Image (cartoon, helix red, strand yellow):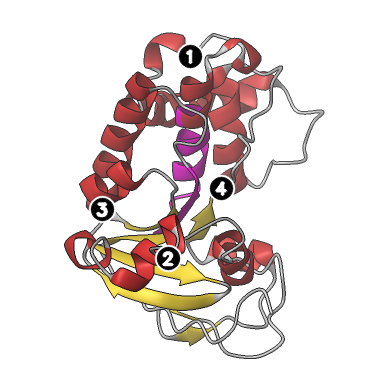
Amino acid sequence: MAVAGVDLRVRRGSIHALIGPNGAGKTTVFNLLTKFISPSAGTILYQGRDITGERPADVARKGMVRSFQVSATFPNLTVLENVRVALQRKLGTSFHFWKSDQSLRVLHARAVELLEAVDLADLKDAVATELPYGRKRALELATTLALEPELLLLDEPTQGMGHEDVGRVVALIRRVAAERTVLMVEHNLSVVADLCDTITVLQRGAILAEGPYATVSTDPLVLEAYIGAPE
């Protein structure tokens, strides 16, 4: 089983990390929570409500919004237009492609505000495909924030980044987490140590250890899972 008996509790207002070796089931947990996969057993509760049978779009509307390992932006739209697409949901015009561009100008101020929050306001007219990788991840974070999440699920937010971009994204996550709950899958343990209140370690689809970084980083079972058993 990809995920077996994972009893995960995420405290409101915290930054909670899921870590573990490749194949531990981390992204599968995200897919289960956001209903991209239907669980074969168990219950998913969000804000005290059973969402086990909900559809992905319904879960997102309730405030549980995720990012993905691969940056998901519209490459040929500008940075501002990418955020504006996400904001269109509130207008109910997401699929009104025949409408004038002027009908979306009401969203401009909020889009710029979100870009300022992720340090992209000066690049609002740049085409997304031309952005460096780290800035694309920041843009994805802005479009995610446009959906006004209460619980933000970040899947490998610093994957493939250089040191400078990692530092920038860590600062952004800390900033946006001030008013939200964050559950993140992350392979960079220095990021986890710097950001997270609670760490849950998965191995082979089950919880191996849980607690603050100082506790789990010295757990013999966790060390064995990451670096192997001593000779």
Residue type, label 2: Ala
Q: Give me the C-alpha separation between circle 1 and circle 4.
A: 21 Å
Q: Nearer the viewer, mark 3 or mark 4?
A: 3
* 8 sits to left or right of 129: left
At horizontal 59% and vertical 46% (from top left) the residue drawn is 68
Do residues under tags 2 and 4 come within 8 Å of each other at their CB atoms? no
Helix, strand or loop for disc 3: helix
Q: Nearer the viewer, mark 2 or mark 1?
A: 2
Q: Is residue 158 visible?
A: yes
Residue topped by disc 1: 124
Q: Amino acid at mark 4?
A: Lys
Find residue 160 and report its horizontal and vertical position in percent. Answer: 52, 30
Outermost right residue: 98
- How far apart marks 2 and 4 lie (CA) works out to 53 Å
Q: Secondary structure at mark 4?
A: helix
Q: CA distance from mark 1 to mark 3?
A: 24 Å
Displayed quadrant of residue 56: bottom right
Which residue shows up at 59% across the image and 27% down it?
82
